[in-house]
Image (cartoon, helix red, strand yellow):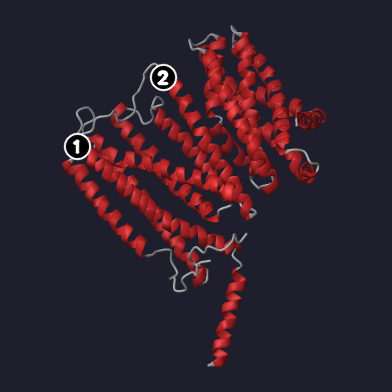
Amino acid sequence: MTHLGYLVAGWGISLSALAVYAIRVTARGRRLAARVPAERRRWMTSEDPS
Amino acid sequence: MTIPPTDVAAHTGSSTTRWLGLAVMAGVVTMFLLGFFVAPEDDLMADSVRMIFVHVPSAILTYVAFGVTAVGSLMWLWKRSVWWDIAAHAAAEIGVVFCGLTLVTGSIWGRPTWNTYWEWGDVRLVTTLILFLMMVGYLAVRSMGGDEAAVSTRAAIVGLIAAVNLPIVNRSVEWWADRTLHQQSSITDGKLEDWTLFTMVLGIVVWAMFFLWAMLHRFRVGWLERQLRVGDLDEAIAARRAEAVDAGGDA
Amino acid sequence: MFRDARIVAAKDLQIEWRSRVTFSQVVPFATLVLVLFGFALDANRPVLERATSGLFWITVMFVSTLAVQRSTSIETSDGARRALLLAGIEPAAVYAGKTAAVAVQLLLVQVVLVAGVVVLFGAEIEAWGLLISTCVVATVGIAGAGTLFGALVAGVRARETVLPILLLPVLAPVLIGATRAFDDAFGSVAVDGWSWLGLLAGFGIINLVLGSLSYGVLLEET
């Protein structure tokens, strides 16, 4: 296939960037959720806490 | 006020995200197979046209994401909607990822196509670069710290300024590019083969599902961060401890 | 409202005049940037002439971040922002006044810069009207956007580094337009400078409106 190097680079960077972001956001989610009581872990339609 | 579920596990996943995640992965595999083995090569660009399957979806989702940020910014300023504020931030972060990918894939595609990594004459590429810088600024404002509402307001204004100025940037780059010696058309020029078109649309769908997946997670992350900052957690934890003591006392 | 704006502008300019920062620091800085460009481009006359418009406006961009920083810091020290609100001055008037003050300072610097490029880069001005109009219109846009962003980052740590990254991408159209208009004014490139002036004017108007609308929110909430 012509330009294979570019294709590998382009597709490779795209998929790995999305994968890395996915891992980071889920890891961040775990860390944060561990610190918050279970009943507060999801969106609550209460008034603005600030 | 809705009663929140009390059995939420210590992560930001849910059955929705699990299904979406699986769909994305299946979609990526399908994209790859179709993109590399079914879609034909281009008359002019040969195989480098296969970059279209990652470049165009990234570009489209960039604008979708930043559109959400713009709407969210408006809703915060207008209605003080916390939900939209969190959504705006989440969308901006994901949008920056997509925007970066758009630029990188565009640059990589440009090399075999125009023999250069950067084409100043491509209006969309240049405008997207400015947009990228603006949204990096948005994220910087978000991370500056300070009073919760003040941060949200500052970020919202930055988001709206970016949204309003983007057409001006686009127009000025258009006029500027028109007068360069070479009028470079953008990478894709219209007609696409059937399978190429189908795979590209599939790519857009897959990227969109990823966007939804990421938004769900990132929104929940944003909510959790907010809880830790301002959510009166100490009270909630103390109240729960008191309950446990009572229950222990009764038993 | 205009009276209040004039008062605010006069106050800012008086503070500037008394401290003479514009003259003693900003103007030398601007001139220094031109000199550095000369060194960087190896005093290559044709290259310098071709690049004059761009170098001029890049210098203005850098100077504008300084001018905006100073303009904002006038209020953030001593809690003067609250005082302005309490004094009952309309936020839009404060915005207009501060924008005008920044614009005046930038225009003064540009006078020196024009002299600088004529002397140092050998620029020849063919269309004075276009040159001056471009300076005025572009500067209004720069000052308008700058003052808004200045208020936005006021009172936040690390604001000196955040302000340029917020302001400069938004100013990209001004850089493009003003440089092309100057190219026409210097006769170095065959472009129609006056049409770019329209874009600059549009930019200015839109950002002035944005600024007037947002300034009140920023003063109150941040």
Left or right position of B35 against B124:
left
Question: From mark 2 to mark 1, how far is it between C-alphas?
Answer: 31 Å
Q: Where's residue B160, x and y in %?
A: 54, 40
- What's the amino acid at mark 1? Asp
Label 1: chain letter? B
| Residue on which disc 1 sits | B194
Q: Name the residue under label 2.
A: B178
- Quadrant of the rendered image containing residue C205: top right
The number of discs equals 2
Residue C203: percent from left, percent from top:
56, 27
Residue farthest to the bottom, as pictured? B251
Residue at coordinates 60% horizontally, 82% vertically from top-left?
B242
**Which corner quadrant of the image does residue B34 belong to?**
top left
Say if B55 sits above or below B76 in the image. Answer: above
Instruction: Give the mark nearer the N terminus: 2 vs 1.
Output: 2
The amino acid sitting under disc 2 is Asp
In this orientation, does residue C48 appear? Answer: no
Q: Which residue is nearer to you in this view: B109 or B81?
A: B81
